[in-house]
Amino acid sequence: MTMQFAPGALALARPRAVLSMPRADANDPKAMLAQINAAFEEFKAANEKSLKGKADIVLAEQVERINTDIGTMQANMQKAVDDLNAKVIAGGGGNVIGDIPSDPEYVNAFKAHMRKGDVSAAMQKGTAEDGGYLAPIEWDRTITGKLKQVSPIRANARVITISTAGFKKNFSDRAVGSGWVGETASRPATSTPQIGQLDFPLGEIYANPGISQQLLDDSAVDLEAWLRDEVDTEFSRQEGIAFLSGNGVNKPHGILTYVEGAANAARHPWGAIGVVKSGAAAGLTADGFIDLFYSIPSEFRAGAKLFTNRQSQGAMRKLKDGQGNYLWQPSYALGQPATLAGEAIVEIPDMPAVAADAIVALYGNMEATYLVVDRVGIRVLRDPFTNKPFVHFYTTKRVGGGLQNPEPMRALKVGQ
């Protein structure tokens, strides 16, 4: 008898591949680093199998799943390293009722007494009067916040602090003329360098949250410190977006607006940030990145990095050189970034994803390219009067940003 199978049944019957190694402890960056390298080896093996064989939906899904997992593990490892660097051990240990620390000796003695069963009344924690008051529920005295991705452009750019209302910078085109002459030949006038000026206007970002005075007085959590951290994170997120794509209206001019063809392409006296094509109409190629890396002057090569988002790294992970070696390589030491053809990768969450005509990456020396201008810093006005009984924390920050020099940076644009 011949067995009949529905179309695709065999493919569906095959087991879905998964990463073979167990998940590393989120508190052990070294184990996470080892797991990333092992996962990358598994990714390469699966991708090679996919490239050599016929089209296979299950195998293609396996490659993409491992690719996604590597990106997740890379981000988790970076977060674990950051958490270890910034971790502050707080609290004295032990249970707390209100603001009164527990007495371990008393608690143990009370538990031992209750286990003897020599109490005259039947007590239970389900009823407050029968003993429920004595079994309070412990609760977490920290506040876990939803993820806010903060751009690292400030950390890589040049940052200055000013003490006046604005900042302007002068630029010379260095176009001085010269010529060779004989001993008695005339010396006609030569061209004189031109000086241009660029304004870096300041924008202001603010927050004005309020908390009632009684909640501030009675809360077991330091709400004032918590709110200060929340506002600081939000300011960092907003200015990071502006440093990348801000239109200059009450905010910084973003670096992407200075790329050839963008809104501020003609704003800088020296021109716009140059564009290199990716080599594919809707994707990335190894040759496109090689062209990108060699497009900036050698004087700026030392501090150059590749700035892109996490989704684009997934596409980069499949690229190979002419000898079949993968261009993308994971971190091999804690605190070190992943690389593409040896160039350090900096993840910018708000960079455009891979799509036709999109600027998916910037490559160059960000410190020599982009200037961040701070006016004083963050100011906080504690206002208990305007809206009683609420205390408002009026927080402001004045910051500007713009292109300092287009020469050390290039943009990778998807296209041929």
Image (cartoon, helix red, strand yellow):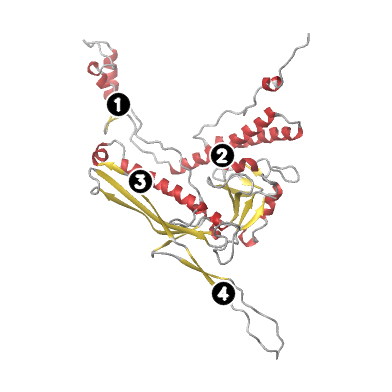
In front: label 1 or label 4: 4
Q: Which residue is mark 4?
A: 194
Q: Residues within 10 Å of mark 1 (few under 14, many from 20)?
A: few
In front: label 3 or label 2: 3
Q: Which residue is mark 1?
A: 104
| Residue 64 x, y percent position in the rendering | 64, 34
Q: Is the C-beta separation of discs 3 and 4 under 8 Å?
A: no
Q: Which residue is mark 3?
A: 228
Residue drawn where x is 76% and y is 31% of the image:
53
In the image shown, does 388 or 106 lie closer to the viewer? 388
Question: Quick check: 336 above or below 365?
Answer: above
Label 1 or label 3, whichever comes before in sequence order:
1
Label 1 or label 4, whichever comes before in sequence order:
1
Q: Which residue is mark 2?
A: 74
| Residue 81 x, y percent position in the rendering | 50, 41
**Gap in Å between the C-alphas at discs 1 and 4?**
78 Å
Whether residue 330 can be seen here = no
Q: Is the C-beta separation of discs 1 and 3 under 8 Å?
A: no
In the image shown, does 133 or 175 lie closer to the viewer? 175
